[in-house]
Image (cartoon, rainbow, N blue to C red):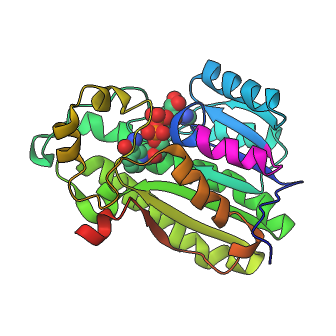
Amino acid sequence: MSLTLDLTGRRALVTGAGQGVGAGIAGLLARAGARVMINDLVADRAEQQAAELRASGGDAVAAPFDVTDFDQVTESIADLDGVDILINNAGNAGGDSWPGMVNFAESDPADWDRFLGVNLYGVMNATRAALPTMIEHGWGRVVTIISDSARIGEPKMAAYAAAKAGAAGLMRAISKEVGRHGITANSISLGTMRTPLTEASWEGLDEQQAAARLKGYPVRRPGLPDDVAGLVGYLVSPGASWITGQTIPLNGGYSVAQ
Ligand SMILES: NC(=O)c1ccc[n+]([C@@H]2O[C@H](COP(=O)([O-])OP(=O)(O)OC[C@H]3O[C@@H](n4cnc5c(N)ncnc54)[C@H](O)[C@@H]3O)[C@@H](O)[C@H]2O)c1
């Protein structure tokens, strides 16, 4: 077995890859030789990321669509002629803003839809659309990005946690349906990250405030997109064919500290 990742000939779709974690994952897959489809709700972001990857020698195309819309997802994946590797990364509140952090007892049901739409239905839509070609080809990899707020539970993020936990449950269930077709399905559960979405909240912190925020993280820094790309690279590699249905914590040791 080789530790070098060679994805030549594979077609990968990364949702929400216009920035942040998704862009980091897409970069690694492109460097490994995959043809990478850069999805994002914001078309300019998808185009720009794809152009940057092409400029550095990768094979990348923009695939702007809304993962919450099943018809758009299905049509786009059909246009792309199927995918071998699906990374369900689009998430958070389904846009660039986050509804206020509230206790569930005070939450507004109208806000739940945003979380369920992107973090659960988005994952169901893309996975449903991608699996038939993977089954036909007898090989596939599905990796879904979830959050420790779902795996462990965090206050004031209940709807987000419920949606992410649902996505992890979906991965577990389908792993049992499609394993015999050479397809694996896993989730990666992230701790606190530094990405464009959270950048403003990190920038304002002095050393003491940052340390307080990272209390509970033995590795005293937030996660970065490259940290996630490394684990995704392993999970989509040929050598990872015996790991499926798992939710893998990736969080600088936060679970250890619980
Ligand atoms: N940032 C964190 O601290 C953190 C922590 C744990 C888990 N996560 C998860 O990691 C993943 C990536 O987070 P990030 O911080 O890089 O996010 P980000 O907000 O920086 O980037 C996400 C991208 O997804 C796109 N997107 C949003 N809704 C979409 C939709 N409906 N269809 C297509 N694209 C859509 C956005 O336009 C954006 O470009 C998410 O699933 C998030 O829930 C993030």
Report the span colored magenta.
Answer: 23-35
Task: Confirm whether the magenta stretch covers residue 34.
Answer: yes
Front-lying residue, 221 or 138: 221
Front-lying residue, 147 or 138: 147
Res 6 quadrant in image: bottom right
Give the farthest residue toward the top.
44
Left or right placement of residue 251 versus residue 49 in this view: left
Q: Is residue 118 visible?
A: no
Q: Quadrant of the C terminus?
A: bottom left
Res 204 quadrant in image: top left
Q: Position of residue 164 (x, y in %)?
A: 39, 55
Numbered-mark total: 0
* Secondary structure character of the magenta stretch overall: helix
Q: Is residue 116 above or below residue 133?
A: above
Left or right placement of residue 63 versus residue 163 in this view: right
Front-lying residue, 145 or 192: 192
Left or right placement of residue 220 versus residue 62 in this view: left
Q: Position of residue 41 (x, y in %)?
A: 57, 28
Q: Position of residue 197 (x, y in %)?
A: 40, 31
Task: Confirm whether the magenta stretch covers residue 228.
Answer: no
